[in-house]
Amino acid sequence: MNIIFPSNCLSLLVTTTQLVPALAKILLYGLGDIFAIDNIYSATKIGKESCFERIVARYGRKCTYVVVGDGRDEEAAAKQMGFPFWRVSGHSDLAALHHALELGHL
């Protein structure tokens, strides 16, 4: 089952992987249609909080940001920025996120 997020949603990737290997993984796993190259941020040198701050500076405060991740560092960064956090440990968690977005719960 492919998950396609609603048209009013934008997928951004913040990773602790360096940018070139992250881009290679995106292409290798066929995720290029989900994450545009200018929407991929590497937190290797500056940290996730700084990446989130850059994203807010780029898109503004009127957006609803949802941090999706599987670790405590993502959850802590989301909490620091005041963003909701959606824990993902499997495909069903992504399906539930998609459903919540479609219903406008986030």
Image (spheres, rainbow, N blue to C red):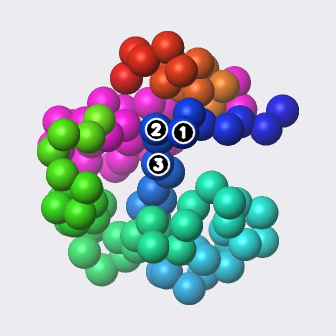
Tag of residue 20: none
Tag of residue 10: 3
Q: Residue at x 34, y 49 (%)?
A: 73
Is residue 73 toward the left or the right of residue 58 in the image? right
Q: Residues within 10 Å of mark 2 (few under 14, many from 20)?
A: few
How far from the left and from the top, in percent, is residue 16?
43, 68
Q: For mark 1, what is the residue?
A: 7
Disc 2 residue type (three-letter): Asn
How far from the left and from the top, in percent, is residue 11?
50, 51
CA separation in Å, label 1 and label 2:
4 Å
Select label 1 or label 3 by which is in front: 1
Residue 69 part of the magenta segment: yes
Q: Quadrant of the C terminus?
A: top left
Select label 3 or label 2 by which is in front: 2
User: 24 above or below 77?
Assistant: below
Q: Quadrant of the N terminus?
A: top right
> Which range is magenta?
65-93
User: 36 above or below 3?
Assistant: below
Q: Residue at x 47, y 59 (%)?
A: 13
Residue sitting at the far front? 7
CA separation in Å, label 3 and label 2:
7 Å
